[in-house]
Image (tube, rainbow, N blue to C red):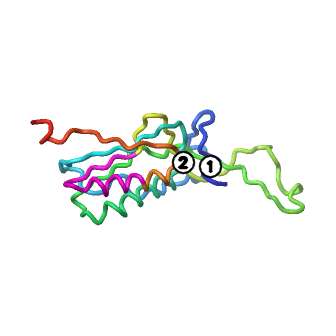
Amino acid sequence: MHGRNYTPVRGQPYTRKEYVGGPPQPKIARFTMGNPSDKYDHKFRLVSLEKAQIRHNALEACRVAVNKIAGPLGEGNYYLWIRVYPHIILKENKMIATAGADRLQEGMRKSFGKPTGLAARVYPGTVILELGIKGNNVKAALDSLRVSASKLPVKTKIEEFGIPAEVAGA
């Protein structure tokens, strides 16, 4: 199974972990990185333009991509916040595809499926992540968001939000 099998939004999201034996843990190591308490000169958002489900693997790849480019700026010079949480359980009814498999499996009888991963459901306008940058590191911030957007199964746009204090006072 690949991530593209789970990208379309179909039906109710399945979130009942009490019925699943051993629900998977999200692969996202940290939802926030950097210094959250500082004031930042520029703030950017990565916003979804489509309705889809984003697997936790893709969100972690997105986080790593941003951190790889923004990390060398210094731990105190940026703040990354992943805004969506993967709480939808993805299940798969695994089938055997070898010779003689028809004697071993049940087909669609009792086909609850085993949990294979987690996903976050996003809609148009959903903020996927936010990035705050200090100083004149705007090019690095935009590059990191562009690279991280390529890791996601949805079309996205990068928007700047929040007016810096110097501009607001002028």
The image shows residue 154, relative to residue 63, as above or below, that is above
The image shows residue 1, relative to residue 109, as above or below, that is below
Quickly name the residue at label 2: 153
How many residues crowd around disc 1 within 10 Å: few (fewer than 14), some, or many (20 or more)?
few
Quickly name the residue at label 1: 4
How many residues crowd around disc 2 within 10 Å: few (fewer than 14), some, or many (20 or more)?
some
Depth check: give the residue in front, 52 or 118: 52
Q: Position of residue 131 (x, y in %)?
A: 31, 49
Q: Is residue 115 magenta?
A: no
Q: Where is residue 16 in the image (x, y as percent from the top left)?
A: 56, 40
Which residue is rendered at x = 76% and y = 44% of the image? 110
| Callout 2 amino acid | Pro
Quarter occupied by residue 157: top left
Q: What stretch is highlighted in magenta?
A: 129-146
Q: In the displayed image of the protein, which residue is found farthest to the left?
A: 170
Q: Pick the quarter of the image with the C terminus.
A: top left
Q: Is residue 144 magenta?
A: yes
The image shows residue 168, relative to residue 82, as above or below, that is above
